[in-house]
Amino acid sequence: MPFPDVKLANRPLHFLYLCDCSGSMAASGKMQALNQAIRQSLPGMAAVARDNPEARVLVRAVRFADHAAWHIETPTPVDQLEWRDLQAGGIPAMGEALKLVAAALQTPPMEVRALPPVLVLISDGQPTDDFAAGLEALLRVPWAQKAVRLAIALGHDADLEVLQRFIGSEPATAGRSPRRPLQASNATSLAQYIQWASTAVVGAASMPASRVSETPLEPAAGNIPLPDLPPTVLDPTDDVGPLVW
Amino acid sequence: MNRWAAPIAASRAGAAHLRAGRPCQDAVLYRELRDTDGQPVMLMAVADGHGGRRYRRSEVGSRLACETALAVASAALASAPPEDGEGAWSRWLAHDLPEAVQGRWLEAVQAHWQSDPGEGGFEPLLYGSTLGLVVMTARWWGHTGLGDWDLVRVEADGRARLLEEENEPTVLGEATCSLCQPQAASLFARRAALYPLALEEGDFALVLCTDGIRKSCATDGDFLTLAAWLARSGGEGVGLLPEALDRISREGSGDDVTVAIGRAGALGEAQATQTTALAPSPPPAAQASPPRRQRPAIGRALAIGLALAAAGAGLLALVWPRTQPQPQAAPTSPGLRAALAEVERLCGQPVTIPLELRRRRDLFVALRQGRQDPGQLKAAAATDPLAALIAADLPADQRSNAPAPASKPAAAQARRPLQALGACPALREALSRQWALTPAATTP
């Protein structure tokens, strides 16, 4: 009997950037560094996607300043993505951005058989709107609960507590520290974090190993075992550039 | 009477695992034995090791899971049968067997660790694995286990129905239940069921598979079509099943892929002589099975359909897409015949209807939210008649862009299309209850 007429398909992996575009991002070249870091990460991300054909990596981006809006609304295959520069100006409506993403993670349009998405929140300041309401809306969505949520703090003014609430708490396990927001103090470390999220994390999320549900009564924390950060970022004695932000 | 042919099975390393140099972490095993009455019994098990650093011996864990399950089940089935028959076997599938399997599996993985200790201390987590087990006897068949395996029943005419899937409400992302969890034995009960074999029951196959197959399919309809094809073609030739599994993984999820197929009656008989490589010892009794019987369910369904057509062809035409122009609305299409047979099957066992509908709750949600086209499902009724019935029952005012149905009058309920297909009150009420539990799309 010939193979049946069924549609076999790889699984979509949605990767979403949530980028702070408030006025403070214009200071000290942060906005420029973020644009450059994302643009430079794309070839590596595309290479990871090619190496993992079972996953179809689709990128979207949200910018938030006075209001949140889609910067890239259509889920775009990474090899077709052309990054347009984000512009800084306004105050960070982070809660609104989370609500925007929450709506996008509904099923539909999200596919039932998609891989857990990856959400990367990048901010240098504090939310000026109702962050708690936005986070609550986001975490009500099953796909957001399943997502790998990462946060990158730019400079010492970033609200680490807010970013920690976004990524959730994950207690320390054997040999691993509790998960914390990544803190970028200059363009070099920001580029390394973006590179790590768009390659190592995408690689891990593309072919996730199944894992044990912690208890039948409580959802497990952490949906994809995250790969290690590059040693140069982990070790403060390494030369990752001066403290700028 | 022996209804069961020897199972056929195959397990293949996934395309992504091969590329990464990782072993196949799935396992499959089947066995034939005799019960105390000398009747043949078939067992088949699949297991899926979790993979990843935390579960780095899960390929051993999955193999031991299958071996342990078959050893424990064989011992029980070959000993004295319980006094109250099927009730006791049901409890055995849900409670006694799981306790024994988990205990023996923990002993087995610990013994493996002691014989080949690795870095760090022993913990069952290293060997984490799912387990799905199907037991097929002369009087009943049943399943049990835990984790993200799927079980599909395929009728002789190709209709396929998802019987069992993991529905743990707390399982998120790629998480699944596992034998390495302390409470593992208690998790079997919700995946356990026993089905008595009726004398007049038609021929069918059971397709038990690890999650790599379903995750490779674009839709559940594709998965059921694929399962039906595997059931019918799996025994056709040496190498066909492994080749098919390789293709499924390569073009799909990249995960390890494993299937075990049990075949009842003539469905297995027709293939029993061709499965020497995958099923080394087809039982003689399978070859001596009586000739395939008529399928009375189909005959009755046809009668119902013809009566309905005579009484209200116009109504049927509204309910079901016609695939043939003449005669109008007569149940000559395979899809309509399958749907009518499905109605009769469900209404013949009303107690199982709520469970069967609950297992398709994703489909209810997809229809309710407008993500699934009901017309497509009805057109594919020959493959998945239950999905087609659910689609036919979707009232216009329950679509996602329609007003809430809270104030719908009872008269409107009474006009639902399933009545035209002869659906019993139990089926219509169960559908209504499931629709009521189905959330609409959340507005941003």
Image (cartoon, coloured by chain):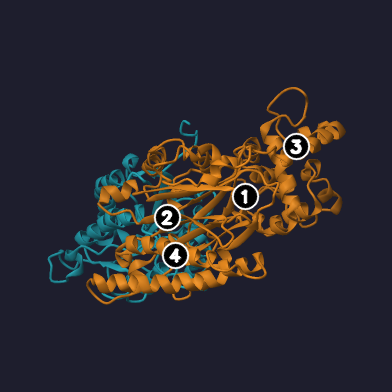
Chain colours: A cyan, B orange
Structural crowding at the residue carrying mark 3, measured as other residues with C-alpha within 10 Å and reported as few (<14), some (14–19) or many (≥20): few
Circle 2 marks a residue in which chain? Answer: B
Discs 4/1, front: 1
Quarter where residue A82 is shown: top left
The residue under label 1 is: B1
The residue under label 2 is: B29
Q: How much space separates mark 4 and mark 3, taking CA atoms? A: 42 Å
Q: How much space separates mark 4 and mark 2, taking CA atoms? A: 11 Å
Instruction: Answer with mark 4 or mark 3, whichever residue precedes in sequence.
Output: 4
The residue under label 3 is: B299
Tags 4 and 2 on a common chain: yes
Quarter where residue A81 is shown: top left
Label 4 sits on a secondary structure element that is: helix
Q: How much space separates mark 4 and mark 1, taking CA atoms? A: 24 Å
Query: Mark 4 is on which residue type?
Result: Ala
Label 2 sits on a secondary structure element that is: strand
Label 1 sits on a secondary structure element that is: loop
* Numbered label tally: 4
Instruction: Answer with mark 2 or mark 1, whichever residue precedes in sequence.
Output: 1
Q: Is residue B276 left or right of residue B370?
A: left
Structural crowding at the residue carrying mark 1, measured as other residues with C-alpha within 10 Å and reported as few (<14), some (14–19) or many (≥20): some
State the residue at coordinates (54%, 37%). Answer: B270
Label 3 sits on a secondary structure element that is: helix
Query: Mark 1 is on which residue type?
Result: Met
Place of residue A76 in the rendered image (x, y in percent of width and height, measured from the top left): 39, 43
Instruction: Answer with mark 4 or mark 1, whichever residue precedes in sequence.
Output: 1
